[in-house]
Image: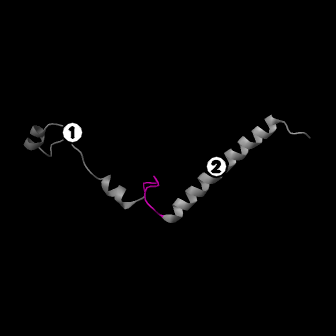
Amino acid sequence: MTWTWQDVTALAIVGIAFAYVAYLVYQRLRRRNDGACGGGCFGCAQNESESTQVVTIGTSENLAVQPNKPR
């Protein structure tokens, strides 16, 4: 079988794609074992404490008069 430039190019593209996927899997496994923040997993305690913040939208007049009355 003779190899043409198209066969070599296609094989190179598939090889590069496989290597990239293997690299992503390696990075994912390494990041999970490190336990470092910044991985985007949202598992850190710091992210949980920030998510409990309450933000009120409205004028302060209504809150000062009847702060516990449902609207």
According to the picture, the residue beneath numbered tag 1 turns out to be: 57
Task: Indicate whether 32 appears above or below 7.
Answer: below
The residue located at (90%, 39%) in the rendering is 2
According to the picture, the residue beneath numbered tag 2 turns out to be: 21
Q: Are marks 1 and 2 in contact (CB under 8 Å)?
A: no
| Residue 47 screen position, x and y as percent | 36, 55
The residue located at (65%, 53%) in the rendering is 22
Please tell me in which quadrant of the rendered image residue 1 appears. Answer: top right
| Residue 39 screen position, x and y as percent | 47, 55
Please tell me in which quadrant of the rendered image residue 59 appears. Answer: top left
Q: Which residues are magenta?
A: 35-42
| Amino acid on which disc 2 is placed | Val
| Amino acid on which disc 1 is placed | Ile
Q: Is residue 47 left or right of residue 53?
A: right
- Residue 36 sits inside the magenta stretch: yes
The residue located at (50%, 65%) in the rendering is 34
Q: Residues within 10 Å of mark 1 (few under 14, many from 20)?
A: few
Secondary element under disc 2, as helix, strand or loop, is helix
| Residue 42 screen position, x and y as percent | 42, 54
Q: Residues within 10 Å of mark 2 (few under 14, many from 20)?
A: few
